[in-house]
Image (cartoon, rainbow, N blue to C red):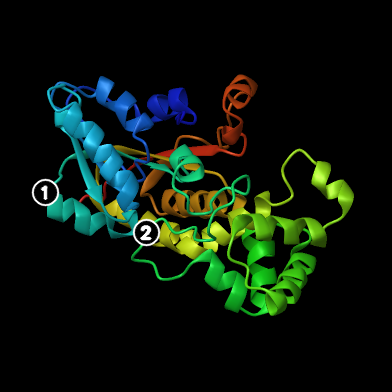
Amino acid sequence: MHIPVLQKEVIKYLNPKPNENFIDCAVGEGGHSAVILEKNGPEGKILGIEIDPELYKKLNAAEIKNQESRISNRLILVNDSYINLKEIIERENFNLISGILFDLGMSSWHLEESSRGFSFRKDEPLDMRYSFENQLTAEEIINRWPEKIISRILKEYGEERFSKRIAKEIIKEREKNPIKRTSHLVEIIKKATPYWYHHQKIHPATRTFQALRIAVNDELNNLKNVLPQILEVLEDKGRIVIISFHSLEDRLVKNFFRESQKNGRLQILTPKPISPSEEEIRTNPRSRSAKLRAATLIKVQS
């Protein structure tokens, strides 16, 4: 079951009012959208963007089943990447946008049901793509990319302290056998890292899997390229809420907010990022690294 992260805080900072329109840029399993739709009726709409075609079909089927409900009639779903935010808004003729939400975390569906190798706890193909239009897979990186680049990916995107050792072990292993499945990669990571590292709070493969997923889906560049588009599409005093799960994502958002505030385009609502409470982390351990930042748009008068 997918539990929306920082749900109360999302509602507090998005502050949805009756008849306002919102965009959920990574709608996932629709948890946040459902709560916003309870607040922005009777006429307010949500444009929900989902890059994964399978998750989009699942969501769309759920919407069709519930099409008699007042809520689902106000949810417009599109299968696309938020990198195309402006294009999507024009195509769907979706105007008067009062708020935009980005939940940059992976959905539970990807870990539990997608069978694409996002989870180190399952034996699955090393794919890790959100969209099949993307040609690059984790298997391609692991089996074909140079040791130095693999090491850099693990260090930069995963903040993996043993990145060099893991990359070296990957190269050694792939010379004997191609590395095609998650279980094989987990064995390699364990072999490359000290015994004590296998008994930390997080699994020794966590950072490597995170790094590969970010690299496969070009997540940091996508975020960097979509942020300026927000300033062009929001209404005056429109709210932006972004939940990130990685220090590099959070840094991008923080710097963008600060720069935009300096230029008189945003007012930051969260001087420091909001983290989940201990109670939420207990209920939903995947929320532990979440950081929420929020801001309000200041429209430039023409």
Q: Amino acid at mark 2?
A: Ser
The x and y percentages for residue 143 are: 60, 74
Element carrying mark 1? loop
User: Does 1 sit above or below residue 227?
Assistant: above
Quarter of the image with the C terminus is: bottom left
Of residues 41 and 72, the one drawn nearer to the viewer in this rendering: 72
Residue drawn at x 28%, y 55% as measured from the top left: 80
Q: CA distance from mark 1 to mark 2?
A: 24 Å
Q: Which mark is residue 6?
A: none
Element carrying mark 2? loop
Q: Tell me if 14 is positioned left or right of 179 in this view.
A: left
Q: Amino acid at mark 1?
A: Asn
- For disc 1, the marked residue is 93
Nearer the camera: disc 1 or disc 2: 2
Q: Residue furthest front?
A: 177
Residue 76 appears anywhere in the view: yes
Residue drawn at x 56%, y 44% as measured from the top left: 245
Residue drawn at x 59%, y 78% as measured from the top left: 144
- For disc 2, the marked residue is 131
The x and y percentages for residue 278 are: 65, 23
Badge 1 local density, few (<14 within 10 Å), some, or many (20+)?
A: few
Q: Within the image, what quadrant is residue 189 found in?
A: bottom right
The x and y percentages for residue 191 are: 81, 60
Q: Tell me if 19 is positioned left or right of 140 in this view.
A: left
Of residues 294 and 268, the one drawn nearer to the viewer in this rendering: 294
